[in-house]
Amino acid sequence: MFKTANVGTIDRSIRLLLGAALIASPYFFASTLWDNTLVRFIVPIVGVILILTALVRFCPIYRLIGASTSTEAGDAD
């Protein structure tokens, strides 16, 4: 889908776990933090973005700064 993958295996695992935690957090953790409407919607959106970047193995921010955590041959710039 994208020219080069720039997200490695460990990075993908962390993104998937953190993304799932951010999506689930408003439902499982009662806190006054979730009373703020902006926070209640932004946190899960960030979680979805993390999961999407893990699934496609491409992070646009990594591309902008020239970073890569991928170690597979041909994947790194």
Image: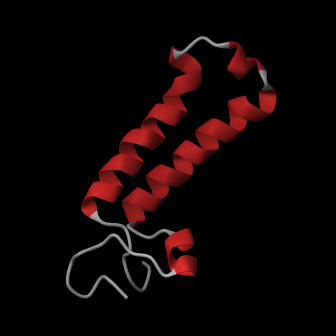
Name which residue lies at 49% across and 52% down: 50
Q: Nearer the viewer, residue 1 or 5?
A: 5
Which quarter of the rendered picture does the N terminus lie within?
bottom left
Name which residue lies at 71% across and 35% down: 41
On the rendered structure, is 28 left or right of 70? right
Name which residue lies at 53% across and 34% down: 23
Residue 35 position within the rendered picture, expressed as x and y whole percent measured from the top left? 76, 18
Q: Nearer the viewer, residue 23 or 32?
A: 32
On the rendered structure, is 17 left or right of 29? left
Depicted 35 relative to depicted 59: above or below: above
Residue 18 position within the rendered picture, expressed as x and y whole percent measured from the top left? 43, 41
Depicted 33 relative to depicted 22: above or below: above
Residue 19 position within the rendered picture, expressed as x and y whole percent measured from the top left? 47, 42
On the rendered structure, is 47 left or right of 56? right
In the picture as drawn, the residue positioned furthest to the left comes out as 73
**Image quarter of residue 57:** bottom left
Q: How many marks?
A: 0
